[in-house]
Amino acid sequence: MRREPRDAAVLVVIKVVHTTAWFAIESCFSYVLYSGLAKRSDRRAALAGGVVALECLVFAANGFRCPLTEVAASFGADHGSVTDIFLPPWFARNLPVIHVPLLVLAVGLHVRNLRHGRAINRRCAAGPARRSPSGSRPPRRRVRRGPGVPP
C-alpha cells in the first residue's frame, strides 16, 4: 500500500504528539517514583499519580493498545502501530513490561509513606504564617536559654 505525502506528514504529526504525550506522562511517572522513594507523598505526587492512573485506565480500556494505533493505521502506518515513536524500538515495544513493576513499586512506596504519617511534605505542613485579624503577625515567642548562653 502506497502512502500519499499528506498521509506521511500526518503520521509524523501523530508520532510527535504521541512522543510528547509519552514524555509528559513519563515525567509524571518518574516524579511519582522519586517522591515515593524520597518519602514525600504530597499533592504534587497525587496530581502526577492521577495523570499516570488516567493513562493506565485509557490504555486498559482500549484493550492494552495505544488509542493512537487506530488513528495511525488509518493513515497507513506499518503494522498499524505508533510504538515506533521516537524511541529505540526495543524500548518502545517493552514499555508495559518495564513499567508494571515500577508502578507497583511506586504504589507500595506511597502506601508505606501514608501508613507512616508522611502524607505531606514537612515544609508544607506548617502552612502559611498565622496572622491576627488586624493583618499583622503575632509576636514571636522568645526561646528561653540556659545560663551563660547569649540571647
Image (cartoon, rainbow, N blue to C red):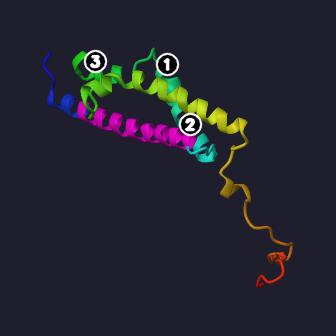
Which residue is located at x 54 percent, y 29 percent? Answer: 105
Q: How many marks?
A: 3
Q: Earlier in the sequence, mark 3 or mark 2?
A: 2
Q: Local crowd at mark 1 within 10 Å, few (<14), some, or many (≥20)?
A: few
Q: Amino acid at mark 2?
A: Gly
- Read off the residue under disc 2: 49
Which residue is located at x 21 percent, y 28 percent? Answer: 7
Asked which quadrant contains residue 81, the reply is top left
Measured as percent of width and height from the top left, residue 93 is found at 31, 22
Task: Please report the bounds of the magenta region as a residue range.
Answer: 11-37
Asked which quadrant contains residue 64, the reply is top left
Q: Amino acid at mark 1?
A: Ala
Q: Secondary structure at mark 3?
A: helix
Q: Main secondary structure of the magenta part?
A: helix
Q: CA distance from mark 1 to mark 3?
A: 18 Å
Front in this rendered view, residue 60 or 90: 90
In the visual, does 42 lie left or right of 31?
right
Measured as percent of width and height from the top left, residue 82 is found at 30, 25
Which residue is located at x 25 percent, y 26 percent? Answer: 89
Q: CA distance from mark 3 to mark 2?
A: 29 Å
Q: Amino acid at mark 3?
A: Gly
Residue 16 part of the magenta segment: yes
Disc assigned to residue 60: 1
Measured as percent of width and height from the top left, residue 127 is found at 73, 60
Q: Is residue 16 above or below residue 151?
A: above
- Read off the residue under disc 3: 80
Measured as percent of width and height from the top left, residue 32 is found at 53, 39
Asked which quadrant contains residue 99, the reply is top left
Q: Local crowd at mark 3 within 10 Å, few (<14), some, or many (≥20)?
A: some
Q: Quadrant of the N terminus?
A: top left
